[in-house]
Amino acid sequence: MIDNHELDQSLKTLTFIWGANLVSVLVYLFVIPRFLGEDILAFLPPESHKTIQAILYVVSIGAIFLARFFSKHILSGKMTLSQRTAVTRHPAIQRYSTAMILALAFSEAIAIFGLVLFLMAKDTVSLYLFGIVSILSMLMYRPVRQDILDTARNLEMLSRVVGTRPV
């Protein structure tokens, strides 16, 4: 089972990472537009703007599904990422951390898409729409103690069935 101290330390680290990503999105939404104000020049032609906007909507929806897909498969053990480094943490914490950070990267990318549209076409609606979707996605992937414990329990059951130590 997971050592409580290790679990607490990992949760603190993951919460810090999650919070930093959330603050980044809030900066995209409120600080950057405030500083740029009316000084931003929209250099993207309207027809190109609509095309890029549509592409980024589709990519954002795909990012949400990819975040869920990768998280689910990493946590279940169906997918593993590079195992070059020695694992010093409990396998459940390692898997959970990897899945959460990957999901947060996809979530933050959605906000960046809105920021790009804002910077290229002065599109504040897209900035806030993509930002809100990003924040909602991040809220779905916030670090939860019980999720790590559930992952550990699933890995232990899997190791009993297969007869190996979970990785």
Image (cartoon, rainbow, N blue to C red):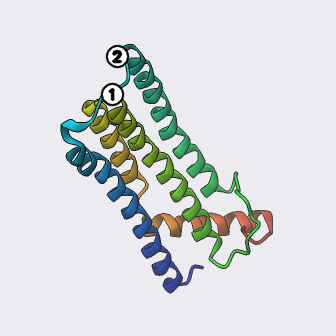
User: Horizontally, is 11 left or right of 129 in the view?
Assistant: right
Residues 60 and 151: in front is 60
In x, y percent, where is residue 99? 56, 57
Q: Residues within 10 Å of mark 2 (few under 14, many from 20)?
A: few
Helix, strand or loop at mark 2? helix
Number of numbered discs: 2
Residues 114 and 95: in front is 114
In x, y percent, where is residue 135? 34, 48
Give the quarter of the figure containing the N terminus.
Answer: bottom right
Image: 75 above or below 87: above
Helix, strand or loop at mark 1? helix
In x, y percent, where is residue 34? 20, 47
Please tell me the numbered disc located at residue 121: 1
Image quadrant in which you'd find residue 98: bottom right
Image quadrant in which you'd find residue 92: bottom right
The mark nearer the N terminus, 1 or 2, is 2
Residue corresponding to mark 2: 46
Image quadrant in which you'd find residue 115: top left
Which amino acid type corresponds to the residue marked 2 in the rendered image?
Answer: Pro
Asked if disc 1 and disc 2 are in contact, CB closer than 8 Å, the reply is yes
User: Horizontally, is 133 left or right of 167 in the view?
Assistant: left
Residues 52 and 21: in front is 52
Residue at 44% from the left image edge and 24% from the top image edge: 52
From this viewpoint, which residue is outermost toward the right? 163
In x, y percent, where is residue 43? 35, 25
